[in-house]
């Protein structure tokens, strides 16, 4: 080999190699370096060589010095005007014996490099290593340095050697050395010193090799640090380097695949700023990423930008637009691109037709898909297998299996044997429709045309496990092994996952434990499926132990398994453990995905942690994500359930501003929030918008709006919407019928409520307890108690168990018509059923028993209610006091009276008078005196108002005394202004004696001032007369009373 080279290389009297070697070296070095340019520099000009020819001399421009070589044109040889370095010091122009001398120098350099590498690899870096290196070569030359760095794989060791050489030589390294270190950095994916190295290169005026720039970007991409790659590009620009064209295109492609459209667009525009010319292919990538994310406005804007740059869309661009716009539901836009393609003189290819056919059948426009398929088949001799498979999938998804089978026959007629993909498509659809037997028959028939592959067997095993036919799945697995196909981890994962979802955990566990004997190792997906299956059935501790086993097996946990653990811990009431799992995930360095954050937020809201749910939503952006439609849906739903439905309006418009594309779930959630907030008209508008956007309303959509309309008594509109839903083929459920029954019942339209109930039962729907409660409550409010009892009996006959609310409605209704004994029978029946009475039920029953004179039982219930932690209300206290007073149990009534005052509950005037009368009859004068004193205190408050003696005439409540048209106190025809103190006194008077006050019609009840307006009637004189009659004959009481 050496001899051959020797024959080629020419000699000259100056004993120097020919110029080819030098020129090649100079060109190579130039190509490896990139010019140092500003970030805003225009497109690169023609490369300038680092040498020039002047006469017969070539001047080589190196950093810091110039070396001149004489060029002999006749013999094509060089001489130098400076002494050449000795052999072994890196010179490629040696002054000894031609080619043999060159080889000797190279061998010496290689030997030196080997010795240096042995020292670096053999001992740790330190003074000893430095001493050995110094002995090998005291002053390293560039070729040795470059050779050592090129072989080095350890970045830390390479940097130590790099800095040591820098210290020994007291000179900066060459550009090749810096690029070599950066290559090692890219290979090892350790980026800590990247900024420092780039800064040094920038100061020295070195350029960055295009190859190094590209490898750096690729290194970040392989490390899945796309944002790091973007930051690296920005760093290059910061130090005035010009990133390579291929570095940009590589990064944009990676960002597009990672669905980071905004970052990709930033890099795309940055390329253009630097003067790089973008292509149709790059525009295609950008359009694809935005369209795939549903950001159609941005995609269309890029198309317009492409046209403004005088680029014509090619077939690939049109195919991408058809596919991407179709997949996000914009079928009409996809059609537009398909027709525009033909209008531009381009001929649709197989991809164009197949993509459009797939878009159409997925949008339930199968007839159009069939028409396009037939257009494609016209005058076509060789069928497109891909288009046939797509069309077969369309027929199968629509349940038209006979048409799918006809396509198989048509393929055979054209001389093509249906592929395994075509059969797998039909088998998949049969599995989704639950036609297992038909799928098994087709599985046997397909063997005539195509040999089942691993995917075929996995499809069959999947549908058998889903339908619970585990033994048949095992038989198919045996058949697969007999055919020479052995179950892979995908097969195992399918079986484990489907069995777990069917809650057949024992079978799933058996497969999991036996997987190693099949020569297969469970992966993270296997563990995740089983962890989720155990968690779903409440075995969360076992699920966590399996999770720990997964960690011990060396599998790195991902966001999917953490999502399962968090969801299942929260679902089974262990929210603290759920929070711990999230913290453990952060501690292990596992990054959450948007699905995990959405699940965590949903769990927090369902656990009643509203503020925590809000915090998680706000924290989504800190994890590098933007809230999607599901994020907003969870937030709106959680806030609506927590009573904050009024926030729906703001959140809805925030969602729109963020560019979220609403799906059916999002629309349903927002519509429900608007209805709960009372904004039914806005919900109605969204219902219409939903239709326009191509999202057919579901039963949930109609149910929310119907319920919202029924609650605000717009029943005719609710019923019209009810009929519209039925006309569109929506199968209405019990919830929708119950909403209408409740609405008609509350306004007294009992006959219509009955008709709705009858229609519901004719549809085969069984009324639930809420439905029956709505109807019974309507009958009770209409005082049709007998009919309500008939409904109650029908409810039990229909095997619908009454709940606490059912009994409360009946007990309340019976007490209202004074059928207290019957009410007490229902009370006892409720107790026997093990139902816990509510506060309303206790209050109603206590009042009823007291009014019926059964005060002993009423008092027993009263004490039982308090013992169970219940808090009696004013109704209970007043009823019990009156009942005991009427039963001549004055002291017991007075004890309840004292408790009432201590609890701050309101006592009405009638109760006070009845108690005073009872105390008078029982001659309990001391207690009567106390009550009279309390009554006198209330009269003082009234006196303050009536006399106006203590009134400060400030801006307050206008008041007109009873019996007068205008106030006589200020000498004018204008009513007086009550002071704040008088207003409070008036409120206390109303609270104690239930004095009726008139209210202006245009004032709200809740406004304190409006409540005081216009006192028209006060029965205080009757109260005074009653008190005087009761205490007559008791001098002390009469004296104190009249002093007041």
Image (cartoon, rainbow, N blue to C red):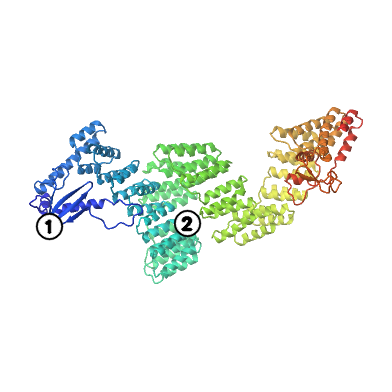
Q: Give me the C-alpha separation between circle 1 and circle 2.
A: 65 Å
Circle 1 or circle 2, nearest the eye: 1
Q: Which sits in the foreground, 148 or 708? A: 148
Element type at mark 1: loop
| Residue furthest bottom in the image | 379
Say few, some or many: other residues with alpha carbon within 10 Å of mark 2 (under 14 / 14 to 19 / 20 or more). Answer: some
Say few, some or many: other residues with alpha carbon within 10 Å of mark 1 (under 14 / 14 to 19 / 20 or more). Answer: few
User: Which residue was labeled with disc 1?
Assistant: 73
Residue 112 falls in image quadrant: top left
Q: Which sits in the foreground, 165 or 125? A: 165
| Residue furthest right in the image | 1033
**Which dot marks residue 672?**
none
- Identify the residue at image location x=74%, y=55%: 749
Q: Where is residue 978? Give x, y as percent.
A: 78, 42
Q: Where is residue 20? Give x, y as percent.
A: 16, 54
Q: Where is residue 11? Give x, y as percent.
A: 9, 52
* Mark 1 vs 2: CB contact within 8 A: no
Seen in the picture, residue 575 relative to 471 is either above or below; the reply is: above
Q: Which sits in the foreground, 709 or 349? A: 709
- Identify the residue at image location x=52%, y=36%: 577
User: Which residue was labeled with disc 2?
Assistant: 295
Residue 373 shows up from this direction:
no
Seen in the picture, residue 720 relative to 805 is either above or below; the reply is: below
From the viewer's perspective, tell me whether residue 220 is left or right of residue 675: left
From the viewer's perspective, tell me whether residue 979 is left or right of residue 719: right
Residue 736 falls in image quadrant: bottom right
Q: Where is residue 505? Give x, y as percent.
A: 49, 42
Earlier in the chain: of badge 1 and badge 2, it is: 1
| Residue furthest front in the image | 971
From the viewer's perspective, tell me whether residue 161 is left or right of residue 1013: left
Quadrant housing the C terminus: top right
Residue 641 shows up from this direction:
yes
């Amino acid at each position: 080999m050496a001899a051959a080279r020797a024959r080629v290389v020419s000699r000259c009297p100056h004993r120097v190699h020919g110029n080819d070697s030098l020129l090649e070296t100079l060109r190579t070095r130039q190509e490896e370096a990139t010019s140092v340019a500003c970030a805003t520099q225009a497109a690169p000009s023609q490369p300038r060589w680092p040498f020039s020819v002047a006469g017969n001399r070539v001047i080589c421009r190196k950093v810091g010095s110039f070396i001149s070589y004489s060029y002999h044109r006749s013999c094509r040889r060089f001489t130098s005007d400076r002494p050449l370095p000795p052999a072994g010091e890196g010179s490629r122009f040696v002054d000894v014996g031609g080619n043999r001398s060159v080889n000797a120098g190279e061998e010496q350099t290689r030997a030196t490099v080997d010795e240096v590498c042995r020292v670096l690899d053999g001992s740790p870096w330190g003074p000893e290593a430095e001493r050995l290196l110094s002995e090998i070569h005291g002053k390293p030359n560039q070729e040795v340095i470059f050779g050592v760095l090129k072989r080095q794989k350890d970045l830390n060791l390479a940097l130590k050697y790099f800095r040591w050489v820098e210290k020994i030589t007291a000179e900066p390294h060459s550009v090749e050395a810096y690029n070599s270190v950066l290559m090692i950095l890219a290979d090892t994916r350790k980026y800590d010193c990247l900024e420092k190295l780039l800064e040094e290169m920038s100061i020295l005026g070195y350029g960055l090799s295009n190859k190094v720039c590209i490898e750096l970007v690729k290194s970040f991409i392989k490390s899945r640090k796309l944002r790091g790659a973007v930051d690296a590009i920005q760093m290059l620009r910061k130090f005035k380097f010009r990133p390579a064209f291929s570095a940009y295109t590589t990064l944009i492609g990676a960002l597009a695949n990672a669905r980071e459209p905004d970052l990709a667009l930033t890099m795309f525009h940055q390329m253009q700023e630097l003067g790089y010319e973008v292509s149709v292919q790059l525009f295609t990538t950008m359009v694809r990423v935005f369209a795939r994310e549903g950001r159609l406005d941005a995609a269309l804007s890029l198309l317009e930008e492409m046209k403004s740059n005088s680029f014509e869309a090619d077939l690939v661009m049109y195919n991408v637009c058809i596919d991407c716009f179709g997949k996000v539901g914009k079928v009409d836009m996809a059609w537009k691109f398909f027709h525009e393609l033909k209008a531009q003189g381009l001929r649709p290819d197989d991809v164009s037709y197949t993509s459009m056919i797939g878009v159409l059948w997925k949008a339930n426009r199968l007839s159009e898909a069939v028409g396009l398929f037939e257009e494609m088949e016209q005058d076509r001799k060789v069928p497109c297998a891909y288009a046939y498979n797509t069309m077969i999938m369309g027929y199968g998804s629509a349940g038209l299996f006979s048409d799918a089978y006809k396509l198989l026959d048509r393929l055979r007629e054209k001389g093509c044997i249906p592929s395994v993909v075509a059969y797998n498509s039909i088998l998949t659809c049969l599995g989704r429709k639950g036609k297992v037997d038909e799928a098994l028959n087709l599985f046997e028939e397909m063997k005539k045309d195509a040999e089942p592959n691993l995917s075929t067997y996995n499809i069959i095993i999947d549908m058998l496990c889903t339908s619970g036919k585990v033994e048949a799945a095992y038989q198919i697995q045996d058949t697969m092994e007999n055919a020479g196909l052995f179950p892979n981890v995908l097969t195992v994962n399918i079986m484990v996952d489907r069995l777990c979802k069917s809650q057949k955990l024992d079978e799933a566990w058996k497969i999991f434990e036996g997987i190693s004997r099949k020569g297969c190792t469970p992966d993270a997906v296997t563990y995740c499926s089983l962890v989720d299956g155990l968690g779903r059935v409440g075995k969360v501790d076992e699920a966590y132990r399996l999770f720990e086993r997964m960690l011990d097996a060396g599998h790195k946990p991902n966001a999917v398994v953490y999502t399962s653990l968090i969801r299942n811990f929260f679902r089974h009431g262990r929210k603290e453990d759920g929070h711990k799992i999230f913290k453990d995930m952060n501690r292990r360095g596992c990054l959450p995905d948007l699905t995990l954050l959405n699940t965590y937020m949903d769990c927090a809201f369902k656990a009643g942690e509203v503020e925590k749910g809000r915090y998680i939503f706000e924290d989504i952006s800190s994890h590098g994500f933007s809230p999607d439609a599901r994020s907003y849906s969870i937030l709106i739903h959680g806030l609506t359930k927590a009573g904050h439905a009024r926030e729906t309006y703001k959140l809805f418009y925030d969602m729109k501003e963020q560019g979220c594309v609403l799906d059916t779930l999002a629309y349903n959630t927002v519509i429900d929030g608007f209805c709960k907030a009372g904004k039914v008209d806005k919900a109605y508008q969204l219902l219409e918008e939903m239709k326009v956007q191509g999202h057919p309303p579901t039963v949930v959509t109609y149910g929310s709006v119907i319920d919202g309309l029924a609650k605000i008594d717009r029943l005719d509109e609710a019923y019209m919407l009810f009929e519209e839903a039925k006309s569109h083929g929506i199968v209405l459920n019990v919830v929708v019928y119950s909403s209408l029954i409740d609405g008609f019942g509350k306004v007294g339209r009992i006959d219509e409520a009955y008709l709705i109930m009858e229609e519901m039962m004719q549809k085969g729907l069984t009324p639930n307890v809420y439905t029956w409660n709505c109807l019974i409550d309507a009958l009770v409010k209409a005082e049709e108690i007998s009919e309500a009892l008939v409904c109650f009996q029908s409810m039990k006959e229909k095997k619908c168990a009454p709940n606490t609310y059912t009994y409360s409605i009946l007990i309340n209704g019976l007490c209202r018509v004074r059928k207290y004994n019957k009410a007490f029978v229902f009370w006892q029946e409720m107790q026997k059923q093990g139902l816990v009475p509510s506060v309303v039920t206790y209050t109603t029953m206590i009042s009823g028993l007291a009014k019926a004179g059964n005060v002993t039982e009423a008092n027993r219930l009263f004490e039982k209610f308090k013992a169970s932690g219940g808090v009696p209300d004013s109704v209970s206290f007043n009823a019990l006091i009156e009942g005991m007073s009427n039963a001549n149990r004055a002291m017991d009534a007075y004890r309840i009276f004292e408790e009432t005052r201590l609890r701050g509950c309101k006592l009405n005037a009638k109760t006070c008078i009845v108690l005073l009368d009872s105390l008078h009859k029982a001659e309990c004068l001391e207690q009567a005196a106390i009550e009279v004193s309390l009554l006198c205190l209330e009269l003082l408050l009234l006196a303050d108002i009536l006399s106006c003696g203590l009134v400060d005439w400030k801006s307050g409540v206008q008041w007109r005394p009873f019996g007068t048209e205008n106030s006589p106190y200020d000498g004018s025809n204008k009513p007086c202004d009550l002071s704040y103190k008088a207003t409070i006194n008036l409120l206390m008077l109303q609270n104690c004696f239930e004095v009726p006050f008139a209210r202006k019609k245009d004032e709200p009840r809740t406004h304190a001032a409006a409540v005081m307006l216009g006192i028209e009637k006060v029965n205080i004189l009757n109260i005074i007369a009653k008190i005087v009659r009761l205490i007559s004959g008791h001098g002390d009481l009469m004296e104190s009373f009249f002093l007041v």
